[in-house]
Amino acid sequence: MTKLHLDLGERGYDITVGRSLLSSAGEYFNLDRKVFIVTDTGVPSEYAERVAKCAKEYRIVTVPMGEGAKSPEVYTRLLSSAVEFGMTRTDCMVAVGGGVVGDLCGFVAASYMRGIDFYNIPTTLLSQVDSSIGGKTAINLGGVKNIVGAFHQPKGVLIDLDTLKTLPKRQISNGMAEVIKMALTSDSELFSFLEENEINDENIERVVVSSLKIKKYVVENDERESGLRKILNFGHTLGHAIEAEEEMRGFYHGECVALGMLATISDKARPGLISALVKAGLPTEYKGNIEHALSFITHDKKCDGSMVSIIFVDTPGSFRIEKMTTEAFMDLCLKKI
Ligand code: GLY
């Protein structure tokens, strides 16, 4: 078991990584109160039930699986359910699921009675290495992702690696894109490991913990994304555009980020990235309509008018941030993808 502490002063919290942790959630979180648990239909129901057994009083709400649950309607339904359950300011909410559940439940917790305690139990690789840490919570509105949200740090994060055993292989690859992203900008040693190795049950803890250390460092130094935290968007500007273009075909976020990274990596480092993507089971070429996908770039939150902040990796383990016009970025993508 590994315990990390994300140091944000009073808003700091522990991140515990291990196995068979769900049934002992009460040892890590204060569940001796009303506990409102949010999970989704894609998560085995016994995960939330195991956590509920540690609570003094609980309500489990299961939302539909998928990005569609990050809607104002589902958000309002959860708030109403919390009111009906009689939640007070001293009670807490717990997310048991992937990034969608964490973002949604986190935002409900951030806004219910102006903010109550929130714990996160991420059950997908992507949420374990990235989205469960750092306090970003949000829902979507009018087709724009994460446009309504809040920074609301969890009071604790419990990462039970056993939950990955029920995860489809494609979902593991989805999370690996974020691992590769963090290694490329910040940890050349981890990146070399990813070039040579496929993820498996033996090395998963090392990979998750190494990624968490990067994320922890970034959030501790730039909680509100005024500088350093932008590096977590490496590959995401083009990635989000491809994701919007491919919505109907069901591309995963990590698959789109994988393609997005290929546009902003140096020619020298590109073969290494391709090796790591292949090892992780991620795509290395885009066969869709790149011109049309690029038209979504202006919808990206990171796009400030006609300018975008783009993260480039010339050498694994390092990065540079460049502000450029959307046109210049689009030209670059057309050349590289
Ligand atoms: N997942 C990006 C961030 O937490 O900033």
Image (cartoon, grey):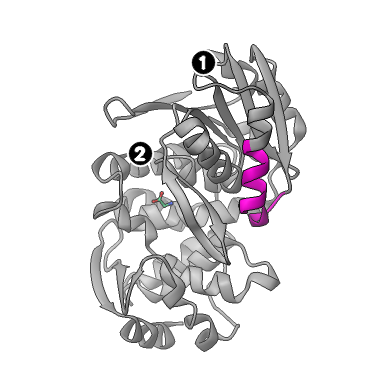
Q: Is residue 74 inside the magenta stretch? A: yes
> Is the residue marked by circle 2 packed among few (<14), some (14-19), or many (20+) residues within 10 Å?
some
Residue at 63 percent across and 56 percent down: it is 67
Q: Position of residue 197 (x, y in %)?
A: 50, 52
The residue under label 2 is which amino acid type? Lys
Q: Is residue 216 above or below residue 231?
A: above
How far apart, in angstroms, are the residues tagged by discs 1 and 2?
24 Å
The kind of secondary structure element at disc 2 is helix
The residue under label 1 is which amino acid type? Asn
* Residue 203 seen in the figure: no
Instruction: Please tell me which of labels 1 and 2 falls first in the chain.
Output: 1
Q: Nearer the viewer, residue 31 or 109?
A: 109
Residue at 59 percent across and 76 percent down: it is 245
Label 2, on which residue? 213
Picture quarter containing residue 10?
top left
Q: Is residue 47 inside the magenta stretch? A: no
Q: Which residues are magenta?
A: 65-79
Which mark identifies residue 105? none
Label 1, on which residue? 30
* Residue 314 seen in the figure: yes
